């Protein structure tokens, strides 16, 4: 799999940072605006902006504290670095130890102190960088007891780099509201919650989406001539996750090589994980050099 250095603020489960070099090869060399309705920690926007492919950028995620991290990182990096450093360093001298400190910050976050620094610390310190919420919307992921999270020095290096070349707008709206704002000349990149967690609330995501609603929104983009890409499900070995998006959408499905499945390796198997990328009409007609490298499969769906 191709790997190139793309800076990131903090590890985030489901991030497309490692797949970004492959995904970007299916994008135009230059376009007006990149819109991410399910931004997460904005790995694709960061990668695109580093290459200066778009004139404008728009980040959205229903999880407002995530957008708070990105806003401070890009607009006021000095503030984020200073506040994160304060929270991070507290764990080193906390009377009950660093694990107890994590739970203290988590309690403060759930009680209402959803500052960017607190959210960032919880992400940096929690197991696998994986957001988990209770049915009432409380952050309930546990700390990784083996490490103390991204150091302030490493964080600062990445934050200042990203802030130097990425200027964008931020929002925390329903994805359908964001899609209404897209116009021809824009490119919409979507990385929604995968199937199995879309039809109802799931503790791995701040909110799920309904499959039929999502298909309808994609069909609407088609009817308006908007270019878009969708990262959605995939397969590992012989197992496929989720069903394909409907054929009547006229999309091309590309399976990107995401490397060996860590879970399979633990079970004594060497199975490659492939993540699906769906391309809208005009993007299918582009020349994609990566296809020559036999790193993926393609099929029209």
Image (cartoon, rainbow, N blue to C red):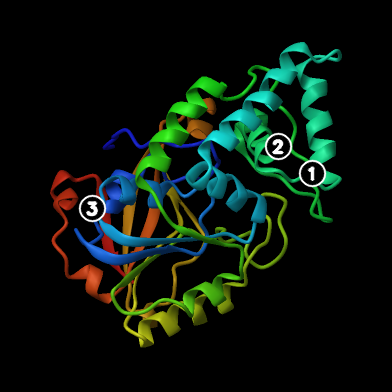
Is the Cβ of the residue at disc 1 closer than 8 Å to that at disc 2? yes
Cα–Cα span, label 3 and label 1: 40 Å
Cα–Cα span, label 3 and label 2: 35 Å
Mark 3 or mark 1, whichever is nearer to me: 1
- Relative side of 42 to 30, left or right: right
Q: Quadrant of the N terminus?
A: top left
Q: Is residue 269 visible?
A: yes
- Relative side of 69 to 133, left or right: left
Q: Earlier in the sequence, mark 1 or mark 2?
A: 1
- Which residue is drawn at the image coordinates 81% and 48% (left, top)? 138
Looking at this view, name the residue that lies furthest to the bottom: 223
- Judged from the image, the secondary structure of the residue bearing numbered disc 3 is loop
Q: Earlier in the sequence, mark 3 or mark 2?
A: 3
Mark 3 lies on residue: 25
Mark 1 lies on residue: 113
- Relative side of 60 to 160, left or right: right
- Judged from the image, the secondary structure of the residue bearing numbered disc 2 is helix
Cα–Cα span, label 1 and label 2: 8 Å
Label 2 crowding class (10 Å Cα cut-off): few <14, some 14-19, many 20+?
A: many
- Which residue is drawn at the image coordinates 55% and 40% (left, top)? 12
Residue 251 sits above or below residue 233 on the image: below
Task: Give the tally of numbered discs.
Answer: 3
- Which residue is drawn at the image coordinates 57% and 31% (left, top)? 81
Residues 274 and 104: in front is 104
Residues 68 and 243: in front is 68
Mark 2 lies on residue: 118
- Which residue is drawn at the image coordinates 54% and 47% (left, top)? 70
Label 1 crowding class (10 Å Cα cut-off): few <14, some 14-19, many 20+?
A: some
């Amino acid at each position: 799999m191709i790997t190139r250095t793309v800076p990131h603020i903090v590890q985030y489960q489901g991030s497309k940072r490692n797949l970004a070099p492959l995904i970007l090869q299916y994008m135009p060399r230059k376009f007006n605006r990149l819109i991410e309705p399910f931004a997460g920690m904005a790995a694709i926007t960061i990668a695109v902006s580093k290459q200066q492919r778009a004139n404008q950028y728009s980040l959205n995620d229903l999880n407002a504290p995530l957008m708070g991290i990105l806003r401070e990182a890009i607009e006021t990096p000095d503030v984020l670095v200073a506040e994160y450093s304060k929270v991070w360093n507290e764990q080193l001298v906390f009377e009950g130890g660093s694990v107890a400190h994590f739970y203290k910050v988590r309690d403060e976050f759930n009680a209402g102190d959803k500052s960017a620094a607190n959210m960032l610390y919880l992400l940096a310190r929690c197991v696998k960088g994986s957001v988990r919420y209770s049915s009432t919307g409380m952050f309930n992921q546990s700390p990784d007891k083996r490490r103390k999270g991204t150091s302030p020095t490493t964080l600062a290096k990445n934050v200042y780099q990203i802030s130097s070349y990425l200027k964008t707008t931020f929002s925390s709206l329903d994805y359908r509201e964001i899609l209404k704002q897209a116009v021809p000349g824009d490119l919409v990149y979507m990385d929604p919650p995968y199937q199995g967690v879309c039809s109802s609330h799931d503790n791995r995501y701040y909110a799920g989406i309904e499959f039929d609603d999502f298909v309808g929104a994609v069909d609407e983009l088609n009817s308006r001539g908007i270019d878009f890409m969708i990262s959605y499900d995939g397969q590992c070995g012989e197992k496929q996750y989720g069903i394909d998006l409907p054929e009547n959408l006229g999309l091309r499905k590309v399976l990107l090589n995401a490397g060996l499945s860590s879970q399979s390796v633990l079970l004594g198997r060497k199975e490659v994980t492939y993540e699906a990328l769906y391309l809208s009409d005009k993007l299918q007609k582009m020349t994609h050099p990566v296809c020559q490298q036999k790193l993926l499969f393609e099929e029209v769906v």
